[in-house]
Amino acid sequence: MGEFDLIARYFTRPARRAVTGVGDDCALWQPQPGMQLAVSSDMLVEGRHFLSTVSPQRLGHKALAVNLSDLAACGARPLAFTLALSLPRIDPAWLQGFSQGLFMLADAHGCELIGGDTTQGPLNICITVFGEVPPGDALLRSGAQAGDDVYLSGSVGDARLALEVFRGSLKLDTALFEDARLRMEMPDPRVALGVALRGIANACIDVSDGLAGDLGHILKASGVGAVLTTDWVADSAAISPALQSIPMARRLELALAGGDDYELLFTAAPDQAPAVQEAANTCDVSVTCIGRITAGQGLQVLDAQGIPLSRRFVSFDHFSH
Amino acid sequence: MGEFDLIARYFTRPARRAVTGVGDDCALWQPQPGMQLAVSSDMLVEGRHFLSTVSPQRLGHKALAVNLSDLAACGARPLAFTLALSLPRIDPAWLQGFSQGLFMLADAHGCELIGGDTTQGPLNICITVFGEVPPGDALLRSGAQAGDDVYLSGSVGDARLALEVFRGSLKLDTALFEDARLRMEMPDPRVALGVALRGIANACIDVSDGLAGDLGHILKASGVGAVLTTDWVADSAAISPALQSIPMARRLELALAGGDDYELLFTAAPDQAPAVQEAANTCDVSVTCIGRITAGQGLQVLDAQGIPLSRRFVSFDHFSH
């Protein structure tokens, strides 16, 4: 099987929204009049973004999920994506599973594959995703205001927890491990919540490098500071049963600096609290208030007694871990 | 230097067309009302798309050039691109050169870097490029009509010639080798010609896999056949002095099946011949008529005496070479 057969067999489906789909030099499509386009690109490399133990189905899911999560963070509705794949060899079983996991998530979000590239080389997956958002409605990192509440969707720390079990630095009951592993290998991008938060949230980012580090990006872009509470790490919807089973000091680290969570971290004015809750209910995802934006610079992390924690939670950096 | 510093130092420039540039979760931009978007994605891997001997400047140029060439083939005007980079290590000299070569070509075409990703891993460069074209004006592979002339821009065979010299299967005078090597390492995407051919050409593709193979894509998509002449391989603007120095049998192979040429291969009705020539003159690029589209299926290659050549010119496939 050559490059063209591979594309035809696993990655060609009838074009829907696109005028011309996979197969010409470019994909051509007509954006909705007046809408802004949101574009994001993510590259996944073995050992950095996934382990060799991941199933091809889950990898196909994750490769698109991390990109959809970027659209979610901007409140953009997914439209289409391109896929560039470098493969060491043509493995039909792998391609079958990968494309299945990819298209299942793509279909769930009405996001169409419109083009791409395949080549032989070390395994590498690069997806570029396109979404749309009405002009002025996009959620940005730069909109946080002093006095805003800081919210977190879903729960954090599980992906890193699973990674640490794989690395052997933590042990976990099998059922809890499988839960955490699912979070690591099949993150659920918060697309509906991102769209629902338009006009409600002042700033938003998706948690990919670690909660504290990603909050730092909002603070820097918005020119503000924040106080982050940690009582929610003891017991809240933001901490899974798997993470609950881990001692508090380690749990704090996993929750605040774990990374790979793909939850939404956003800020909203206090009078928006009911609207935030309603958006969360509509989207069937929990939302936890975890802090407040301050006028001063910097991030202060308080323990359950309100005393500043000295540990600095550094974020995940693809060149330093 | 970490990932964020790397992006800030080498790949962040003030946003122009984009509403939000590099640095947020997504790039946001407003397409021109009524225009169609053209999107293409190419992934470059060492040993497949470039040799380890290429300078970072030239590699930066080539990575964008092969994508711009896809836009050219559709007659689309470049707007913006995303860059995803996997690097084995952070090498400031390499990054400096790569970004310089990349931005020099980007600036020449008014094509803005709006986002991307960097990670550590085997060297891999994935660019997704966006262009615009008025609805209905895009050049496609599927528009060729029986009776159309087949044209080729610039010259072909040099990139493969240089590759064969690197491989040791051919020898070349130093000056001629440097010319051929420049064509291999710094292809000049025919963007202006692609735009000028809107409304003139019936079908178009860029020559990346090899002239005969890429013509095959047009024939298949258009449901037609073609007769390809080869007298132009003996002596024409489509054959460089470097290629002229190679014996005819080998030269034919390099010209018809070499690949990596990034020239435009297009068809136009005979009465468009003056318009084709005028477009070529305006864009300061030669255009050579190399055959004719036929109603029958299949591709027939004729030698200089008009006798069919038996050799089948297979195209470049990233999984079979």
Image (cartoon, coloured by chain):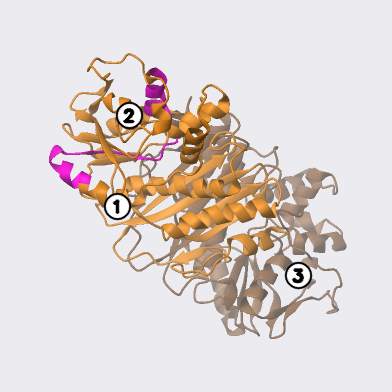
Chain colours: A orange, B brown
Q: Is residue B147 left or right of residue B227?
A: left
Q: Quadrant of residue B308?
A: bottom right
Q: Is residue A171 left or right of residue A268?
A: right
* Mark 2: few/some/many CA within 10 Å (<14, 14-19, 20+): many
Q: On residue B232, which mark appears? A: 3
CB contact under 8 Å: marks 3 and 1: no
In the rendered image, which residue does mark 2 sit on? Answer: A216
Determine if marks 2 and 1 fall on one subunit: yes
Disc 1 marks a residue whose amino acid type is Val
Camera-side residue of B94 and B6: B6
Alpha carbons under labels 2 and 1: distance apart: 23 Å
| Callout 2: chain | A
Q: Is residue B167 above or below residue A79?
A: above
Does residue A89 appear in the picture of this structure? yes
In the rendered image, which residue does mark 1 sit on? Answer: A195
Give the magenta range.
A249-277
- Element type at mark 3: helix
- Element type at mark 1: helix
User: Is A260 included in the stretch rendered in magenta?
Assistant: yes
Determine if marks 3 and 2 fall on one subunit: no
Q: Quadrant of residue A109?
A: bottom left
